């Protein structure tokens, strides 16, 4: 008896694998950016702290969202 292979399932599975790999690459980039922003925040002049804190908050929210997609 022959087995029926559903190619749309195979294609969908490959698409999910690619999306998962892209998501991990995005997470790595966000994490690196967040780390750099934290390092810059520690050295920033007082008048830049609010703007830098906003960037850190936004990156944190983006990281939280992207992580929820895993």
Image: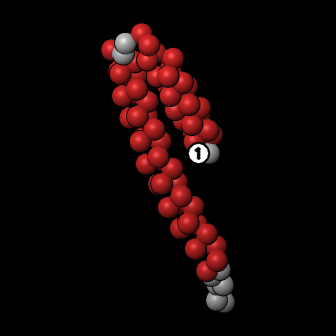
Q: How many marks?
A: 1
Above or below 13: residue 22: above
Q: Nearer the viewer, residue 54 or 15?
A: 54
Give the residue drawn at x 61%, y 38%. Answer: 65
Residue 33 relative to residue 18: left or right: left
Residue located farthest toward the front when viewing the structure as drawn: 47
Q: Nearer the viewer, residue 43 or 65?
A: 43
Above or below 47: residue 20: below
Q: Position of residue 20 (x, y in %)?
A: 52, 54
Q: Quadrant of the N terminus?
A: bottom right
Q: Nearer the viewer, residue 46 or 26?
A: 46
Residue 42 relative to residue 64: left or right: left
Q: Quadrant of the C terminus?
A: top right
User: What element does badge 1 sit on?
Assistant: loop
**Residue 12, quarter of the rendered image:** bottom right
Q: Nearer the viewer, residue 15 or 65?
A: 65
Q: Position of residue 17 (x, y in %)?
A: 52, 60
Q: Position of residue 32 (x, y in %)?
A: 38, 35
Residue holding disc 1: 70
**CA neighbours of label 1 inside 10 A, class few (<14), some (14 to 19), many (20+):** few
Q: Position of residue 18 (x, y in %)?
A: 50, 61
Above or below 67: residue 9: below
Residue 28 relative to residue 8: left or right: left
Above or below 30: residue 43: above
Give the residue drawn at x 42%, y 41%. Answer: 28
Q: Can you see residue 31?
A: yes
Q: Can you see residue 60?
A: no
């Amino acid at each position: 008896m022959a087995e029926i292979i559903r190619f749309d399932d195979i294609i969908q599975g490959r698409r999910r694998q690619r999306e998962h790999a892209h998501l991990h690459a995005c997470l790595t980039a966000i994490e690196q950016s967040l780390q750099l922003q934290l390092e810059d925040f520690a050295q920033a002049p007082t008048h830049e702290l609010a703007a830098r804190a906003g960037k850190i908050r936004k990156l944190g929210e983006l990281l939280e969202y992207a992580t929820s997609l895993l």
